[in-house]
Amino acid sequence: MIINPRTEEAYQLFHNGILALARAEQQGIRIDLDYVDKKIRFLNRKVDRLEEEFKETSFFRHWQHSSKRTVNIYSNEQLASFLYNVKGMRIEKETATGKGATDDDALIQMNIPALNVLLRAKKLKTVKEKYLKSFLREQVNGYIHPFFNLHLVVTYRGSSDHPNFQNMPKRDEESMQIVRGAVYPRLGHLILEADFKGIEVSVAACYHKDSNMLKYIRNPASDMHADMAKQIFMVDDFDKFQPSHYLLRQAAKNGFVFPQFYGDYYKNCANNMACTWGKLPKGSWKKGQGIEMESTFLSNHLISQGIKSLESFENYLKKIEKDFWFKRFPEYREWKERWWNIYQKYGYFTLLTGFSCSGIMDKRQVTNYPIQGTAFHCLLWALIKTDRIIRKMKLDTKIIGQIHDSLILDVHPDELTFITKTIKRIINEDLPNTWKWIIVPMEVEMEASPINGSWALKENFKI
DNA sequence: GGAACTCGCCAC
DNA sequence: AAACGTGGCGAGTTCC
């Protein structure tokens, strides 16, 4: 990729950005090495036991018996061959190259108890090999110094490596505890994380200026994902503080709204939603499955509303998709068309921050790249400004990293109030004052670890 | 013995 | 007509 800043401002952003990020790299992040050593030994034993347990199953014996060589239980190729050629399992899910898949999803669907043992062994092995061991490999005097690159991503985002600081487990509680439990602030300090709230949606709105979307973003009382949940799941008195409704909102947000923004379409959305939140199979649906609602289940509710199979859910979502792009956010749709036309005519497009993208791109890339890049540039701008103030004031607090839309700092407790107020001001005020194309409020959310507490213990932090 | 490929999985 | 964007990285495998 060729970094192509078309304006002085774009050049300065990356010039100053890489210097600020270099200081974060130099600062480094403290790792509890004793803990990592102990965890690795503990996981070694645990994985060994799981491997033994798996090798005693009749599933494995059949697998080994059918194979000419010694089976490697971690070989997806060998597993696929056994499942799909020997056992004759039907291919429900394919890999990118059209072969039978052996990922989490595919194996769970097969409902073979022995495979759960294998999956658990794989998960713990990943945590150990990919994260914990990389800490030991990369640490110097108990600190890792992840690289934060600005020259590797086609969208003008950043990336991180050796080790990658941007993909540590978060959603899976067990993996999160194991990995982030190794990451600490300096002695007497705490870890602070400042996240832009919904930055990609906000930045997208600065491009397309869709009036309905602007209303959603500017009015804190409105809730796009709740409205979509109401529509998709046909719930009249929606209350997002009720646990089941909260889950429906999550389903609408992560199963429909975001995938649609990235260019997905109703069939995938329907399949994924039915599978993830409804635990519903292809064909006609059974009662008693999926998200538990007040006195019923998601599957019962959908069936009672006349949606009795995946096919019928797909058709229903097809209409919702049409409504979404033609009635709800028509100007967003028109922007995507305009932006695609500009690219086709000139062969490139220029981001609001002054970087230009050229080369062969499809429509989804053309409409996603400017949003992804520009959103990151908001974070980078805030990072540079924060770093400048930290140095000017000679603070003991230091920036230690960046995760696309969040800033991670190692904070001296005495400076906590000052630094949180400063970051808030930078994001709420300084940034929109500097970049006039920002036409929506820029908001920040913060989380903090306890003093001397690991990153696994971070909690919401009220500013 | 390393490059290149595929697959799978972690993050945003 | 077809159908989710961006990375890093471990592992197994094949090719040279």
Image (tube, coloured by chain):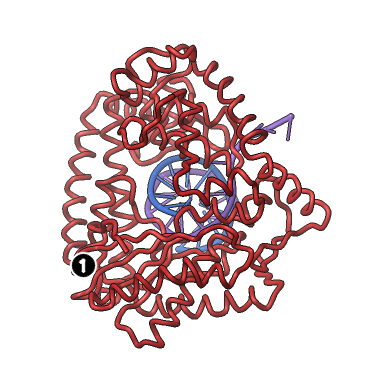
Chain colours: A red, B blue, C purple
Please state the horizontal and vertical placement of residue A390, each as a whole percent of the image.
38, 82
Q: In terms of depth relative to the viewer, which is nearer, A90 or A414?
A: A414
Say which quarter of the image contains residue A451. bottom left
Residue type beneath disc 1? Asp
Say which quarter of the image contains residue A238. top left
Please state the horizontal and vertical placement of residue A350, each as a whole percent of the image.
71, 63
Total count of labels: 1
Please state the horizontal and vertical placement of residue A444, each as a whole percent of the image.
42, 61
Looking at the image, residue A180 sits to the left or right of residue A13; the answer is left
For label 1, the residue is A32
Looking at the image, residue A68 sits to the left or right of residue A204; the answer is left
Determine whether A315 is above or below A323 in the image.
above
Q: In terms of depth relative to the viewer, which is nearer, A384 or A17?
A: A384
Q: Quadrant of the C terminus of chain A?
A: bottom left
Residue at 47% across / 23% down in the picture? A234
Assess disc 1: are there few (<14), some (14-19) or many (≥20) residues with their C-alpha within 10 Å of its C-alpha. Answer: some
Residue at 71% across / 72% down in the picture? A6
Q: Quadrant of the N terminus of chain A?
A: bottom right
Determine whether A227 is above or below A91 in the image.
below
Residue at 22% across / 45% down in the picture? A47
Q: Chain of mark 1?
A: A
Say which quarter of the image contains residue A409. bottom left
Please state the horizontal and vertical placement of residue A226, each as a whole percent of the image.
45, 36
Q: Secondary structure at mark 1?
A: loop
Q: In terms of depth relative to the viewer, which is nearer, A39 or A253?
A: A253
Looking at the image, residue A120 sits to the left or right of residue A369; the answer is left
Residue at 21% across / 30% down in the picture? A56
Residue furthest to the right: A345
Q: In terms of depth relative to the viewer, which is nearer, A178 or A133?
A: A178
